[in-house]
Image (tube, grey):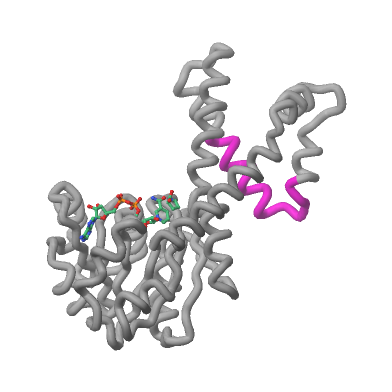
């Protein structure tokens, strides 16, 4: 089984590791590093060896996932330069281009990945891009890692990873915000919070599942719910008073621009 080391054992690494374990990857083939003791304890509770020795983890691994904040990546990776020959580096750092890792590390085969936290429950969505230096085995390992926690799609150009970031990388937060607002709305109308949560979340699941499985566009599906002169139309008209669609588009453009700023600052 591929030996995978995670440098950084925070939120996203934990989601990916739990996805791997749930899909049958053995804990002894995973290792994690982090300077933060509670993160190491959480890893050990999953049966994953964890310490703060990045160099030893890289030496042990066939695949290394860099899962620190983008602003930390240079500082964390600089001491590891020259230690990636024959290994695959998978970066999940928002914004940072493959060329950044090649510049810091020298000889390295880089996969750029943009996963999301629902990997924790097996429903992650990941975009992947590989440089020409990545071997078939390296691509296969990335495929296996991200399909373990959901679905993964390869994109044709590296720039599209920033688009993935704006869509599905940050996307769970957009849906959490909508769910949060809808639960607040439902409780304001008198539902108890448990019932509101159940009904709102089931509605979100149902809408997503229908959009995937029905042979109809989201526009058509929305139209089928929206009776002329009915309740849905009343709500959607009010949303559009607040420029709902334009606001979502502008938010996603802001996420995309921020990914590019992170690259420029690296
Ligand atoms: N949270 C999310 O939804 C997503 C995050 N990402 C990317 O994943 C990366 C990690 O993000 P999160 O997990 O949210 O952040 P986080 O802050 O939860 O985790 C980062 C971890 O890196 C550790 N760290 C700091 N210095 C280190 C060092 N020298 N050696 C090893 N570990 C060190 C920190 O202690 C922390 O536990 C970021 O680059 C982010 O852009 C990508 C997709 C989604
Ligand atoms: O907010 C962020 O920068 C990271 C990348 C995508 C999701 N979380």
Quadrant (top left, top right, bottom left, bottom right) of the C terminus: bottom left
Outermost residue on the front side: it is 265
Residue 200 forms part of the magenta stretch: no
Q: Is residue 17 visible?
A: no
x, y percentage for residue 203? 60, 35
x, y percentage for residue 175? 54, 40
Quadrant (top left, top right, bottom left, bottom right) of the N terminus: bottom left
Q: Along the horizontal axis of the image, is 104 left or right of 207?
A: left
Task: Depth check: give the residue in front, 210 or 68.
Answer: 68
Vertical arrangement, residue 252 with respect to residue 82, above or below? above
Q: Along the horizontal axis of the image, is 263 left or right of 18?
A: right
- Quarter location, residue 119: bottom left
Q: Residue at x 25, y 59 (%)?
A: 8
Task: Depth check: give the residue in front, 198 or 15.
Answer: 15
Outermost residue on the right side: it is 228
Q: Residue at x 31, y 83 (%)?
A: 106
Q: Residue at x 49, y 28 (%)?
A: 197
x, y percentage for residue 152? 51, 66
What segment carries the magenta color?
A: 201-218
Q: Residue at x 14, y 74 (%)?
A: 56
Q: Along the horizontal axis of the image, is 57 left or right of 144?
A: left
- Quarter location, residue 149: bottom left
């Amino acid at each position: 089984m591929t030996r995978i080391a995670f440098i950084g054992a925070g939120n996203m690494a934990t989601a990916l590791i739990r996805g791997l374990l749930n899909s049958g990857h053995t804990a002894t083939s995973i290792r994690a590093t982090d300077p933060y003791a509670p993160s190491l304890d959480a890893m050990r509770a999953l049966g994953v060896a964890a310490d703060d020795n990045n160099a030893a983890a890289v030496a042990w691994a066939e695949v290394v996932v860099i899962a620190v904040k983008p602003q930390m990546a240079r500082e964390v990776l600089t001491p590891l330069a020259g230690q990636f020959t024959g290994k695959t580096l998978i970066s999940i750092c928002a914004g940072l281009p493959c060329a950044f890792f090649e510049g810091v590390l020298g000889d390295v085969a880089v996969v750029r990945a943009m996963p999301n936290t629902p990997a924790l429950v097996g429903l992650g969505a990941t975009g992947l891009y590989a440089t020409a230096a990545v071997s078939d085995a390296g691509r296969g390992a990335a495929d296996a890692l991200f399909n373990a926690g959901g679905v993964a799609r390869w994109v044709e150009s590296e720039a599209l990873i920033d688009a993935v970031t704006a869509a599905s990388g940050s996307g769970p937060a957009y849906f959490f915000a909508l769910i949060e607002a809808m639960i607040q709305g439902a409780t304001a109308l008198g539902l108890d919070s448990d019932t509101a949560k159940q009904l709102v979340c089931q509605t979100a699941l149902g809408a997503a599942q229908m959009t995937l499985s029905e042979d109809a566009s989201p526009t058509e599906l929305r139209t089928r719910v929206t009776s002329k002169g009915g309740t849905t139309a009343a709500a959607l008209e009010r949303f559009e008073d607040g420029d709902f669609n334009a606001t979502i588009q502008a938010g996603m453009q802001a996420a995309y621009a921020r990914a590019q700023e992170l690259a420029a600052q690296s």
